[in-house]
Image (tube, grey):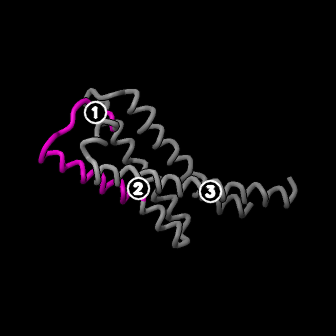
């Protein structure tokens, strides 16, 4: 492969990793805000069979805050130019949807939701994190 082709491939990988990081930051930010602003109407989409109502539903706001922070951390690191740290943050943060899916499955929730939303999100997060974490190695070769 020519040097020009290698540079184009590397540049495309960096762009893909950047777009993936931004989307993986914005999605939980949006979803978290929906839990904060309308917890009882958003909760059924999570995949569990039942949710608390009334005053007990305020617990859902903590889930929203967790999601907002999960989205902001990789975005903040990316904006500050710490791409590698952003990749590591995404990789670690992928444990959140894995935990969510596991919770759904162990509490007899929707297996379809656990796999198509939560485990799929974790897989995409891991893939984007891998792209970000291998950027420097790719550029050096």
Which residue position is annotated with label 2?
Answer: 29
Q: Which residue corresponds to the image point at 38% horizontal and 33% vertical from the top-left?
A: 114
Marks 3 and 1 sit apart, C-alpha to C-alpha, by 36 Å
Q: Main secondary structure of the magenta part?
A: helix
Q: Quadrant of the C terminus?
A: bottom right
25 relative position to 39: left or right: right
Which residue position is annotated with label 3?
Answer: 134
Mark sitting on residue 48: 1
Query: Residue 117, how many percent across, how many down?
Result: 43, 37
For mark 2, give the secondary structure. Answer: helix
Is residue 67 covered in magenta?
Answer: yes
Mark sitting on residue 115: none
51 in relation to 87, above or below: above
10 relative position to 129: left or right: right
Judging depth in this view, the residue of 18 and 39 nearest the camera is: 39
Q: Residues within 10 Å of mark 2 (few under 14, many from 20)?
A: many
Q: Residues within 10 Å of mark 3 (few under 14, many from 20)?
A: some
Contact check, label 3 and label 2, Cβ < 8 Å: no
134 in relation to 52, above or below: below
Residue span colored magenta? 46-71
Q: Residues within 10 Å of mark 1 (few under 14, many from 20)?
A: many
Q: Which residue corresponds to the image point at 42% horizontal and 62% vertical from the top-left?
A: 72
Is residue 36 covered in magenta?
Answer: no
104 in relation to 35, above or below: above
């Amino acid at each position: 492969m020519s040097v020009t082709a290698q540079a184009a491939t590397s540049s495309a990988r960096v762009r893909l990793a950047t777009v993936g990081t931004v989307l993986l930051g914005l999605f939980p930010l949006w979803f978290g805000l929906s839990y904060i602003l309308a917890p009882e109407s958003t909760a059924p989409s999570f995949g569990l069979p039942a949710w608390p109502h009334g005053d007990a539903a305020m617990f859902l706001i903590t889930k929203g805050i967790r999601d907002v922070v999960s989205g902001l951390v990789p975005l903040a690191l990316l904006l500050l130019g710490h791409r590698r740290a952003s990749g590591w943050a995404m990789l670690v943060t992928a444990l959140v949807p894995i935990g969510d899916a596991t919770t759904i499955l162990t509490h007899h929730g929707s297996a379809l939701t656990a796999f198509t939303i939560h485990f799929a999100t974790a897989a995409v997060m891991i893939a984007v994190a891998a792209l970000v974490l291998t950027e420097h190695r790719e550029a050096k070769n």
